[in-house]
Image (cartoon, helix red, strand yellow):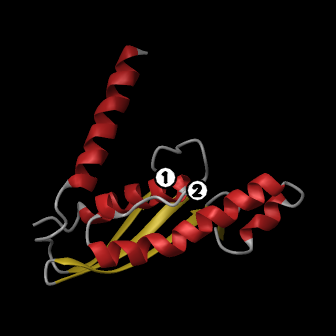
Amino acid sequence: MKKTALLLMALIVALGSLGTAPQKGLKNGVYFGESRGKYTSEPYFGQVKVTIAKGEIAEVAYKIVDKEKKVDFDKDYEKYYKGNDEYIKQCRNDLAGVKKYPRMLVKVKDIDKVDAISGATWSYNIFKAALADALKKAVK
């Protein structure tokens, strides 16, 4: 158990350091990243496509995919929670994050300057982890 806890701590520190590194001086190109973040028991994967131009983030596309149902987490996803108003609200909050986080990142160029939307930390955490996966491929 202690080994698992230490390994988990090391992984958290490593992922955190990817997010806090300056995101300039990257190799130009298009990079893809995928991650579940810390939600490894769930079938949801964040997928990011990042375009680097002039050494910095120029464009970002982000989506979450439910690999169990083989569908994208989109405006229609809440149908899976029909009758559960709390989960429907959560779906809507997280979908707002899926739409907003890429625009915010392009504007500020640094994931640590992108604030999580209240009620949408799940989509933020997955976004940050998928972005880290993409950017590690773009490091000079």
Residue 37's place in the image compared with 102, above or below, is above
Residue 114's place in the image compared with 107, above or below, is above
Foreground of the two, 67 or 76: 76
The residue sitting at 14% across, 84% down in the picture is 54
Q: Are marks 2 and 1 in contact (CB under 8 Å)?
A: yes
Q: Where on the picture, by quarter, is residue 78?
A: bottom right
- Which residue position is annotated with label 1? 36
Residue 33 place in picture, x, y as percent? 37, 65
Three-letter code, disc 1? Arg
The residue sitting at 14% across, 78% down in the picture is 55
The residue sitting at 75% across, 54% down in the picture is 87
Residue 40 place in picture, x, y as percent? 52, 43
Residue 22's place in the image compared with 9, above or below, is below
Foreground of the two, 37 or 83: 83
Residue 92 place in picture, x, y as percent? 68, 66
Foreground of the two, 27 or 127: 127
Residue 118 place in picture, x, y as percent? 55, 56
Q: Where on the picture, by quarter, is residue 31?
A: bottom left
Horizontal arrangement in the rendering, residue 124 relative to residue 112 (left or right): right
Foreground of the two, 29 or 62: 62
The dot on residue 44 is 2
Classed neighbour count for the residue bearing mark 1: other residues with Cα under 10 Å, few (<14), some (14–19), many (≥20): many
Disc 2 secondary structure class:
strand
The residue sitting at 39% across, 58% down in the picture is 128
